Amino acid sequence: MPSTPAPQAGDAPRIAILGIHLEANRFAPVTTGADFRDSCYLEGQSMLDEAAKPAPAMPAEIPGFIAAMNAAGPWTALPILVTAVEPGGPADDGFVQETLARMREMLETALPLDGVYVTNHGAMTSTAGTDPDGALYAMVREVVGPEVPVVATVDLHANISERMAESVEAIVAYRTNPHVDQRACAAEAATLLRRFITGERFTRTFVRMPIVAPSVRLLTAAGPYADLVAEGIALTGPDVPLISVVGGFAWSDTPENGLAILAYGTGDGAAAAAAAQRLARRAWAERARFKVALMPLIEAVDRARAAAADASAPAICLADVADNPGGGGRGNTTDILEALLAADVQGVLLGLFVDPEIAAACVARGVGSSFDAVLNEQNADDHGRALPVRLHVLAVSDGRIVGRRGIARGRTINLGTSAAVRIGGLTMVVVSRRIQAADPAYFEAFGLDIGAFRTVVVKSRGHFRAGFDEFFPPERIFEVDAAGLTSPVLARFPFQGLPRPVYPLDEDTAWTA
């Protein structure tokens, strides 16, 4: 492919925008093409139209990138295709190949290009391979040629492959978990892309560590990963313009798993290489901090009972981290729910529980109705058991909600047909689509006052912390040990693809700088 001359000052560079978002959990059911299309699938001008809405139903990176490019000067946006879906099982490879082919066709039609922005999660797998993100990057590079700069943004739970690192000029990873900096990262990508368009290039140092951390140990307010990210930020400067410390996603179960450090440098890159090695040595020296400790279920129930018994005591939040739809969980496990009901704990709010049949039945019967039902009647499994209950319908909704805090802020989220119900002393929001309980708006839309409950149970791994921090400081949040496809107890999973040995699964893992 012939190279494109670098634009001169005053030119309006032609920039293509495209991406795929899926965080894939190998232990979850396959994510189909219909799943992607039902969530977010946009081509061409429809991408720009959606990005311009007050509350776009698309990855936040795209409106963030567009806004930053607009602020920096003239440019021509060439929207290609973006598709995104809630984390789930490996993507159907037929859909992946179809989408890559469509992207290729549209990219070729858009030539000549001065740059490309790729927005993807970075932990996607397919039913046929472990690195479709790398295939995406390589396809873009093949179409535009070696001279056109390509910049990507990824989730900090990405699994960075060599092919990903080698195919683009830079990979910008989120620095916050809960993720509230997608727009900021996209703006950084826009700034870098404009630098690269003028001909500037960085050197790259890529280090992958034999550390596959449970996701609850990858928060950035405090902890081992927070310290690495903070040091990476401190090490950036003129000689090291960009450092991405990427925690990875354990349940993808791929050879590309492992905490990764990408350091980009100017000049000979010596400063970037030194920074990467410094971060890697620190991660290894402090690897024991990545181990996880969860609250036993019986203790969690006791704390909820105590909170209900003493109105003067502060309310508590129980995190059902093992059933996080934001990591591939099905949103229907019953360990915590059954335990709270069996103990007749009062003043409990729980959500989001995924059961489309129950939600539809509530809408059909109407607000104020009471009826006998069986949770998980249509989709019971070892983790989400069939559970007979008596339901009283408090509210119903079509589930289209604009998030107000944290990861969902300013975005339109579709919970599907939904209802708030009461079961004994427990109030629960039942939804039709797998969405993690990351935003208070998902409860408030049903007229529920979160502050009126003594215990709030959220099916979320960590993103709820940015949404519910106005109700619960960290010391009143307890991560509960229960069953599910996102349990932080990694030893419970039959991993096959991880590059063993890895820490903390294998205590005797060795590594040298």
Image (tube, rainbow, N blue to C red):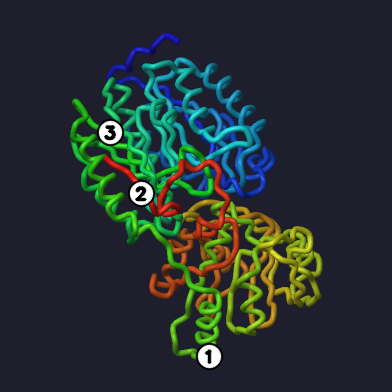
Proximity of marks 2 and 1: CB atoms separated by less than 8 Å: no
Quick one: 362 or 509, which is closer to the camera? 509
**Could you say where residue 207 lies in the image, as x and y percent from the top left?**
33, 37
User: Secondary structure beneath disc 2?
Assistant: loop
Disc 1 marks a residue whose amino acid type is Ala
State how far apart marks 2 and 3 are (Cα).
Answer: 16 Å
**Which residue corresponds to mark 1?**
309
Disc 2 marks a residue whose amino acid type is Arg
**Could you say where residue 70 lies in the image, as x and y percent from the top left?**
38, 34
Q: Residue at x 53, y 83 (%)?
A: 302
**Residue lying furthest top in this view?**
2
First in sequence: mark 3 vs mark 1: 3
User: Secondary structure beneath disc 3?
Assistant: strand
State how far apart marks 2 and 1 are (Cα).
Answer: 40 Å
First in sequence: mark 2 vs mark 1: 2
The answer to whether residue 210 is left or right of residue 20 is: left
First in sequence: mark 2 vs mark 3: 2
**Could you say where residue 210 lies in the image, as x and y percent from the top left?**
39, 44
Proximity of marks 2 and 3: CB atoms separated by less than 8 Å: no
Residue 258 higher or lower than 311, as above or below: above
Q: Work out whether residue 66 can be spotted.
A: no
User: Secondary structure beneath disc 1?
Assistant: helix
Q: Work out whether residue 166 can be spotted.
A: yes
**Which residue corresponds to mark 2?**
175
Proximity of marks 3 and 1: CB atoms separated by less than 8 Å: no
Disc 3 marks a residue whose amino acid type is Tyr
Quadrant of the rendering where the N terminus is positioned: top left
**Which residue corresponds to mark 3?**
264
Check disc 1: other Cα within 10 Å, few if <14, some if 14-19, many if 20+.
some
